[in-house]
Image (tube, grey):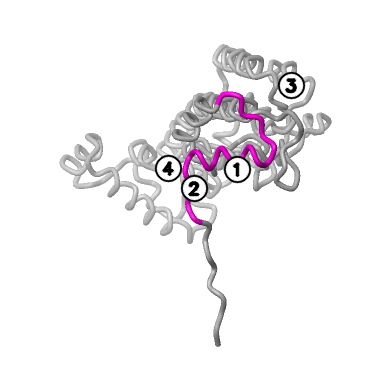
């Protein structure tokens, strides 16, 4: 039986890419500048930011190359800014998780099924931890523990080699009493924290791989505290997680500084429609209030 082979599009030159964009109605007043951008930013990546500026592959009237590039720049700065606050949250949770496990189950309590809500997950976790340690075998603290402690790693060392995704899974699979103990430090329910850590791993991965945040929905729903549900925030948009980050950053001065810097980015790129990220008109007030 004969099947039709799928034929991929042929590659195009930078100059041809300019022609294609112009043929679809995009205004390019400075061709040299546009070429410079396309030589740094993959055409496929760049045109993803053009999706909101066209219909049926034809750009809306007076849409410019610079407009789309400004959205690309905004997205880049937003990713960098998000990584700063995610780093704060991630490091804090490594600390709180390690502390709770160590004091409740001992330095290597993670090797015992009793520590886990789902006892069968103990084996899966330890296998993954072994892979993470192997990948970090050249790090000085790993070398030290292999040499001095025969490759035994206390939980406060083990959490440092885990990916954020596996840290999130570890928290989710702890016994409920331990999750509650950690969550008390934030005055939150562990169900909320578990969900937020999961969502943050997705956002962090997008940021780390320079993926688009603008006009992209989250693949999982963001949970809200009961008192916050009245705000009617879209649970599948980025702002939902930004809103909840304020509860995960215990130090108010750090949070307030981050919000001020976020305001500056949004003000600099005022032409960007932040509603496509889920922002409300009252977003400044909502983020400044931690009640």
Contact, CB < 8 Å: mark 4 with mark 1? no
Q: Nearer the viewer, residue 133 or 59?
A: 59
**In the drawing, does residue 69 fall left or right of residue 136?**
right
Q: Nearer the N terminus, badge 3 or badge 2?
A: 2
Q: Residue at x 60, y 36 (%)?
A: 213
Q: Nearer the N terminus, badge 2 or badge 4?
A: 2
Mark identifier at residue 163:
4
Q: Residue furthest bottom?
A: 1
Q: Which residues are magenta?
A: 10-30
3D distance between C-alphas at marks 1 and 3:
38 Å
Where does the image place residue 282, in percent across and percent down from the top left? 78, 20
- Please say whether residue 17 is one of the residues in the magenta stretch: yes
Q: Nearer the N terminus, badge 4 or badge 1?
A: 1
Q: Which residue is mark 2?
A: 12
Q: Nearer the N terminus, badge 1 or badge 3?
A: 1
3D distance between C-alphas at marks 4 and 1:
41 Å
Could you classify mark 4 by the number of other residues whose Cα lies within 10 Å: few (under 14), some (14-19), or many (20 or more)? some
Contact, CB < 8 Å: mark 1 with mark 2? yes
Where does the image place residue 212, in percent across and percent down from the top left? 58, 38
Compared with 187, 203 (above or below) is below
Mark 4 vs mark 1, foreground winner is 1
**In the drawing, does residue 103 fall left or right of residue 149?**
right
Query: What is the secondary structure assignment of the residue under circle 4?
Result: loop
Q: Nearer the viewer, residue 83 or 181?
A: 83
């Amino acid at each position: 039986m004969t099947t039709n082979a799928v034929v991929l599009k042929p590659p195009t030159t930078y100059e041809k890419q300019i022609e294609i964009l112009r043929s679809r109605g995009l205004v390019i007043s400075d061709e040299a500048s546009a070429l410079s951008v396309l030589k740094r930013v993959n055409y496929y990546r760049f045109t993803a930011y053009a999706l909101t500026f066209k219909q049926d592959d034809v750009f809306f009237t007076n849409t410019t190359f610079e407009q789309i590039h400004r959205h690309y720049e905004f997205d880049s700065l937003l990713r960098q800014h998000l990584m700063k606050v995610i780093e704060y949250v991630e490091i804090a949770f490594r600390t709180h998780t390690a502390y709770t496990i160590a004091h409740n189950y001992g330095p290597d309590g993670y090797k015992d099924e009793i520590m886990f809500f789902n006892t069968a997950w103990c084996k899966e976790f330890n296998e993954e931890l072994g892979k993470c340690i192997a990948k970090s075998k050249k790090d000085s603290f790993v070398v030290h523990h292999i040499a001095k402690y025969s490759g035994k790693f206390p939980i406060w060392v083990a959490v440092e080699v885990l990916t954020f995704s596996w840290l999130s899974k570890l928290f989710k699979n702890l016994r409920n009493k331990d999750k509650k103990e950690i969550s008390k430090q934030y005055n939150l329910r562990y169900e909320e924290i578990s969900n937020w850590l999961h969502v943050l791993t997705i956002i962090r991965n997008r940021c780390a791989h320079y993926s688009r945040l603008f006009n992209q929905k989250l693949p999982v729903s963001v949970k809200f505290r009961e008192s916050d549900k009245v705000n009617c925030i879209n649970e599948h948009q980025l702002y939902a997680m930004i809103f909840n980050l304020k509860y995960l950053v215990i130090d108010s001065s750090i949070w307030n500084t981050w919000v001020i810097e976020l305001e500056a980015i949004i003000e600099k790129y005022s032409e960007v429609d932040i509603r496509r990220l889920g922002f409300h008109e009252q977003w400044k007030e909502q983020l400044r209030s931690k009640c």
